[in-house]
Image: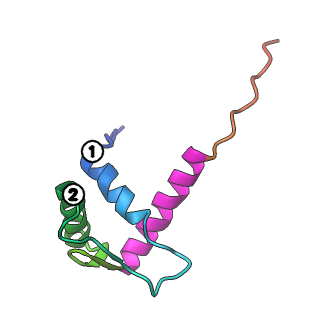
Amino acid sequence: MVKFMLTVELMHEINILSQFDLNAMQQGIKIHGEAEDKLRAASERLYNKGLIDQVDGGYLTHRGIEAAKHAQVLLDALQHAEPEPASSAA
């Protein structure tokens, strides 16, 4: 079984994907030149992977929309997860 490690670089990419408003696809994002290097690098990686249409943000591609949906669902589940009730041992 292949295990994937969540690297700092991937976390930055997920962070950028989570900034897109999936209810308003006509709105893009802009990573400004004065942004932290790690965010500009993450944006460039997303562009190189074909997930956004501009190296400094822009709009999500079709593939990027799917990735952003998954990222936002995951973040929502982790942030709003309800603890499972303890099971009683018989």
* Principal secondary structure, stretch drawn in magenta: helix
Residue type, mark 1 in image: Val
Q: Residue furthest top?
A: 90
Q: Label 1 vs label 2: CA separation? A: 14 Å
Which mark lies nearer to you, 1 or 2? Answer: 2
* Helix, strand or loop under label 1: helix
- Which is more N-terminal, label 2 or label 1? 1
Q: For the residue carrying disc 1, how many other residues have a C-alpha within 10 Å: few (<14), some (14-19), or many (20+)?
A: few
Mark 2 surroundings: few (<14), some (14-19) or many (≥20) residues within 10 A: few
Q: Which residues are magenta?
A: 60-79
Residue at image position (50%, 66%) is: 69
Compared across the picture, whether 51 is left or right of 71 comes to left
- Residue 34 image offset from top left, x and y in percent: 19, 66
Q: Nearer the viewer, residue 30 or 73?
A: 30
Horizontal and vertical percent position of residue 70:
48, 61
Residue 28, horizontal then vertical, whole percent: 38, 80
Q: Amino acid at mark 2?
A: Glu
Numbered circle sitting on residue 56? none
Residue 78 among those drawn in magenta: yes
Does the magenta portion include 26? no
